[in-house]
Amino acid sequence: MDKEIIVMVIMLALIISTAISEGLKHYFRMKKITKADIKLDELELLRKQNRHLEDRVQTLEKIVTDSSYDLKQQINAL
């Protein structure tokens, strides 16, 4: 009877340790996916900000290179 109890305890320990290890694998796998998604979201946000800044720079270049802007600067200088 003692051998049966020992075998049952060993089997129970194996089952519990397997369940815990599988649960941890799943948890860490989901954690990696979340981090990757965050990095992709950050990258997309940076791309949008970059496009916005490029548009603003183009607008400013148009304003500064416009001949009427230069005329205003010359008038203000007088």
Image (spheres, rainbow, N blue to C red):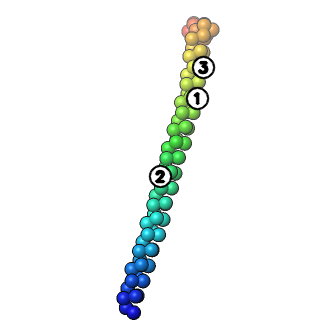
Residue 25 rendering spot, x and y as whole percentages? 45, 61
Determine whether 28 is above or below 7 in the image: above
Q: Quadrant of the C terminus?
A: top right
Residue in the picture at 45% in, 74% down: 15
How packed mark 3 is, by other alpha carbons closer than 10 Å (few <14, some 14-19, many 20 or more), is few
Work out whether residue 57 or residue 44 is closer to the camera in this orientation and state it: 44
Residue 3 visible in the current orientation: yes
Residue 69 is drawn in which quadrant? top right
Please, what is the three-letter code of the amino acid marked with disc 1? His
| Cα gap from disc 3 to disc 1, whole angstroms | 11 Å
Q: Which residue is mark 2?
A: 32
Between discs 3 and 1, the one toward the N terminus: 1
Determine whether 58 is above or below 10 in the image: above
Q: Which mark is residue 59?
A: 3
Work out whether residue 76 or residue 38 is closer to the camera in this orientation and state it: 38
Between discs 3 and 2, the one toward the N terminus: 2
Q: Quadrant of the N terminus?
A: bottom left
Q: On the rendered structure, is 7 left or right of 35? A: left
Residue in the picture at 53% in, 46% down: 37
Q: Which mark is residue 52?
A: 1
Residue 75 visible in the current orientation: no
How packed mark 2 is, by other alpha carbons closer than 10 Å (few <14, some 14-19, many 20 or more), is few
